[in-house]
Amino acid sequence: MKIQKEASAVWQGTLKEGRGTVSTQSGALNAVPYGFNTRFEGTKGTNPEELLGATHAGCFTMALSLILGEAGYTAERMETKAKVTLEKKDEGFEITAIHLSLRGNVPDLDQAKFQELANKAKIGCPISKVLKAPITLDAELNTY
């Protein structure tokens, strides 16, 4: 099976004064603004790091749901936050780390097994596989 999804970006202008929008095939994002000011100055809109974080958090959590199911567990609730670190290096900017912070409630599962399965999802998630930045994780069970 092969699945392909599309997203697009439109940009006009210079780096600092320019403006762009991002959209997704599904329409979940439709001409959402992004730019230098949303990336570095906190202006309303999105930015590539935030989108990557949402993508990684979503992929990881879905992968963990699959792994939990294969092990005979069903989560009542899981919430993953992804903190993406962008740093200036000699060669320019690069993403140097992604930290996943998972909180979940899974009946009949202990902390050690939860951590084991979460680590398996961290490694196996398709988005994790394409990222070269170090990815760390902390997982807490029964936090709701």
Image: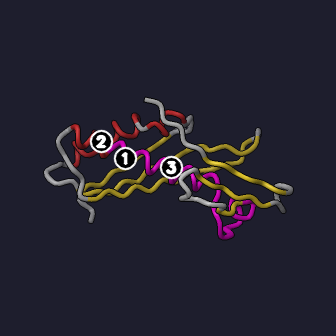
User: Residue 20: percent from the left, percent from the top?
Assistant: 74, 58
Which residue is tagged 2? 66
C-alpha span from label 2 to label 3:
17 Å
The numbered dot on residue 55 is 3
Name the secondary structure under disc 3.
helix
Q: How many marks?
A: 3
Q: Is 9 a magenta residue?
A: no
Which residue is tagged 1? 62
Q: Amino acid at mark 3?
A: Thr
Disc 2 to disc 3: CB gap under 8 Å:
no
Q: Relative to residue 125, is residue 144 depicted above or below?
A: below
- Which colour scheme appears in the figure? secondary structure
Residue at x-position 20% and y-position 38%: 71
Front-most of residues 53 and 12: 12
Report the predominant secondary structure element of the magenta stretch: helix
The magenta segment: 35-64
